[in-house]
């Protein structure tokens, strides 16, 4: 998960979701250098600041203050302010036993210094995506954190340390994660070698026995889609349900869709712009929208205005998370949804092939790099409005027709979802009896139904731009 920036309060910190298998930072917007590190089971207050000597940065100091709950957020911020003040005055506030020797002027850089320079020069300056930066940061600030203050020459002259670290990460965090961490270290070492010839020329990762990896094969075929759609129709939250459907229909990476904002949706031009996909701003592109995709987004907009009225003014897929949009898209594969995330991107590619879409068009639709010099002459933006939209329509029709096409017999829930207008679905959602819901599920679900009913008046004044798409409009005057 990408790092966040928000005012740190007890309420906001308590609402931050845990991140199984990874960590992320929630930085305080009021006090720079003060943040919460959220892991799979814990949340802790930390500070981070640069210790300087005569204006020159010596090294970065990251220090834990306490676990969330040991102190209130206000008290933790006050303590952080004092510690950051000591760092600004050139004093290291850490206990002497926790300090590691810093490099002197003229010495080779530490891994921390090399990583910070790589992040600034190679990632931030070249406008890599926040997700890419966060991935590198996770490798260095979590998996390789005990190396940060070591001079790179120590690691360059002792490749056995690198090999042993790879083995340790493989055991504790997984083989794929170990390979990824070592690739990140290799890139930073090579980058530092360009400006520091005192480093050994041979990258110490040459001694790593890389773990074997193979591409995941989790995509579905056309025959698998009906069962998957039945599972999807049973998901209670309509925003999450539409998010998974749109991921399948677009073949996009989930992270880019979760961070999509309303200004990036152009219904007149029938495109959704993704300004920050994998690869950064230079890889920004427009997704042509098929009829099924527009109907999906129409339902999202109408549901969002009722379920999350504030967040829906900004985000395409709103939620009650502190950031305002969907953060965690994972579902229980056994009980809820068998395929989600990158599984749906692979499914899109598989179905596109079955639909007879050419390999080059699939590259353009999925924003993959074009193979060969000849394909490099193609101007993608000139194909979006007509040719690529026609190919997108072909893929969407095959997906939807495999579920509710001629001769299909979907369940009542699935038929009601895909064949009803969003207005009709919203009306059914608002008319639910809270007492019946309480008997079937929980008081919290009943409270949500009461909130929906209270929003009925707001539904009646939705702007005209949020009505159903043309294919779903009634032929006569619409009932109030």
Image (spheres, helix red, strand yellow):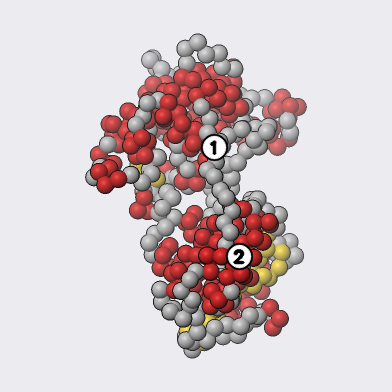
Residue lying at 38% horizontally and 44% vertically, measured from the top left: 368
Above or below, 3 relative to 462: below
Residue 149 located left or right of residue 191: right
Q: Residues within 10 Å of mark 2 (few under 14, many from 20)?
A: some
Per the image, the residue denoted by label 2 is 163
Give the label, 1 or 2, closer to the camera. Answer: 2
What is the number of the mark on residue 447?
A: none
Residue 314 seen by the camera: no
Residue lying at 59% horizontally and 45% vertically, measured from the top left: 328
The x, y position of residue 176, in whole percent, is: 58, 52
The x, y position of residue 178, in whole percent, is: 60, 57
Quarter holding residue 374? top left
User: Viewer-proximal residue, 428 or 478?
Assistant: 428
The x, y position of residue 189, in whole percent, is: 48, 69
User: Viewer-proximal residue, 58 or 176?
Assistant: 176
Above or below, 309 relative to 90: above
The reply to whether the C-beta atoms of the residues labelled 1 and 2 are less than 8 Å apart is no
Label 1: element kind: loop
The x, y position of residue 51, in whole percent, is: 55, 81
**Gap in Å between the C-alphas at discs 1 and 2?**
29 Å
Residue 286 seen by the camera: yes
Decide which of tag 1 and tag 2 comes sooner along the chain: 2
Q: Residues within 10 Å of mark 1 (few under 14, many from 20)?
A: few
Residue lying at 54% horizontally and 51% vertically, measured from the top left: 323
Per the image, the residue denoted by label 1 is 217
Above or below, 30 relative to 49: above
């Amino acid at each position: 998960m990408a790092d966040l920036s928000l005012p740190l309060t007890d309420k906001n910190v308590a609402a931050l979701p845990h991140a199984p298998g990874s960590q992320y930072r929630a930085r305080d917007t009021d006090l720079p250098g003060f943040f919460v590190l959220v892991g799979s089971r814990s949340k802790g207050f930390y500070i981070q600041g640069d210790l300087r000597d005569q204006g020159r940065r010596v090294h970065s100091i990251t220090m834990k203050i306490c676990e969330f709950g040991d102190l209130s957020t206000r008290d933790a911020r006050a303590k952080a302010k004092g510690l950051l003040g000591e760092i600004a005055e050139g004093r290291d506030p850490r206990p002497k036993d926790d300090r590691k020797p810093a490099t002197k002027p003229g010495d080779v850089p530490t891994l921390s210094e090399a990583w910070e320079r790589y992040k600034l020069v190679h990632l931030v300056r070249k406008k890599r995506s926040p997700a890419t930066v966060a991935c590198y940061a996770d490798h260095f600030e979590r998996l390789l954190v005990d190396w940060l203050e070591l001079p790179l020459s120590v690691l360059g002259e002792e490749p056995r340390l690198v090999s042993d670290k790879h083995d340790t990460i493989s055991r504790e965090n997984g083989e794929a994660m170990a390979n990824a961490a070592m690739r990140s270290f290799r890139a930073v070492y090579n980058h530092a070698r360009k400006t520091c010839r005192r480093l050994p020329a041979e990258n110490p990762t040459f001694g790593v026995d890389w773990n074997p990896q193979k591409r995941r094969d989790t995509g579905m075929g056309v025959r698998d889609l009906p069962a998957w759609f039945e599972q999807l129709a049973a998901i209670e939250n309509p925003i999450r349900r539409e998010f998974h459907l749109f991921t399948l229909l677009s073949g996009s990476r989930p992270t880019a869709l979760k961070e999509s904002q309303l200004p990036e949706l152009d219904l007149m031009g029938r495109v959704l712009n993704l300004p920050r996909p994998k690869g950064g701003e230079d890889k920004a592109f427009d997704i042509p929208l098929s009829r099924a995709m527009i109907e999906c987004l129409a339902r999202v907009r109408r549901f969002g205005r009722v379920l999350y009225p504030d967040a829906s003014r900004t985000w395409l897929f709103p939620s009650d998370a502190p950031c305002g949009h969907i953060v965690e898209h994972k579902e229980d594969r056994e009980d809820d949804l068998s395929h989600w995330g990158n599984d749906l991107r692979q499914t899109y590619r598989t179905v596109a092939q079955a639909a007879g879409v050419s390999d080059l068009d699939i590259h353009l639709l999925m924003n993959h790099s074009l193979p060969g010099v000849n394909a490099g002459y193609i101007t993608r933006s000139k194909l979006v409005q007509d040719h690529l939209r026609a190919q997108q329509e072909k893929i969407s029709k095959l997906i939807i027709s495999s579920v509710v096409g001629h001769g299909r017999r979907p369940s009542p829930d699935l038929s009601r979802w895909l064949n009803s207008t969003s207005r009709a679905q919203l009306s059914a959602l608002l008319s639910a009896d809270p007492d019946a819901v309480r008997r079937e599920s929980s008081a919290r679900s009943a409270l949500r139904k009461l909130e929906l009913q209270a929003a009925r008046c707001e539904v009646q004044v939705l702007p005209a731009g949020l009505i159903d798409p043309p294919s779903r409009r009634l032929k006569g005057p619409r009932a109030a």
